[in-house]
Amino acid sequence: MHLFFRNLPIGTVGLLEEDGLLRRLFFEGQPRFPDAVLSMTPLLRLAFEELEACFQGELAAFSVPLAPPATAFDGAVRSALLAIPRGETATYGVLARAIGKPGAARAVGSACRRNPLPLFIPCHRVVPASGMPGEYSGGRDLKARLLRLERYAGC
C-alpha cells in the first residue's frame, strides 16, 4: 500500500493505492492506514493531477482505476452517483429510485457514508429531501464548498 498527501484548493488530501487501484481518499483529520508506505507512485501522481485539473474546471471525467465497491448494492449506488452531472444534486430518494430500490433512501445514505473515494465517486452531490447539504465525510462545510465549486468552476 502506498499513501501520499497533497495540498489542494479544498485542503490537504491523502490518497491510498494498493495493487494498482486507488483505494481511499482521506480528508484532513481522518484516520489513515499505518501500514502504508509514504510514497508517490505513478497512479497517485495521476490521481492528484486529475483532482487538480478538476478543481481548475479542466477535467471531464476521472480515468484513475478505482477499487471495486464492497457490495453489489454499493456498486449500484456508485453507478448512480457517477451519473449525477457536475453542478447538480440528487436526493437520497431519487438515487434509491434510480437503482430500482424506491424505499431504500436510508440505505443509499449508508452507502454514501461508506464511500471510500469521495470526490472520485461524488457522494457530495447527494442531499437530503430538504435540499440542505447534509452530512459528508469531509464535513458539512466542505460539502457545501464542493457544491459551489462545481456550479462555478466545473469540478
Image (cartoon, rainbow, N blue to C red):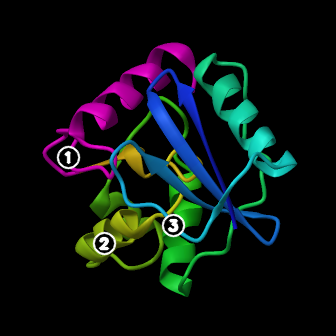
In front: 95, or 29? 29
Provide the residue designation for mark 2. 110
Q: In this picture, which residue range is highlighted in magenta?
A: 128-155
Q: CA distance from mark 3 to mark 2?
A: 22 Å
Say whether residue 137 is magenta.
yes
Percent across and percent down for residue 19 are 80, 72
Amino acid type, mark 2: Ser
Residue 144 within the magenta-colored segment of the rendering: yes
Q: Is residue 77 visible?
A: yes
The quadrant the N terminus occupies is: bottom right
Where disc 2 sits, the SS reads helix
Image coordinates of residue 16 in percent, x first then y, are 63, 58
Q: Secondary structure at mark 3?
A: loop
Residue underneath mark 1 = 134
Q: Give the mark nearest the N terminus, 3 or 2.
A: 3
- Residue 33 tag number: 3
User: Which residue type does callout 3 highlight?
Assistant: Phe
Label pair 2/1, CB-CB below 8 angstroms: no
Q: Residues within 10 Å of mark 1 (few under 14, many from 20)?
A: some
- Residue at the extreme left of the image, as rendered: 130
Examine the rendered structure and indicate whether residue 31 appears above or below residue 7: below
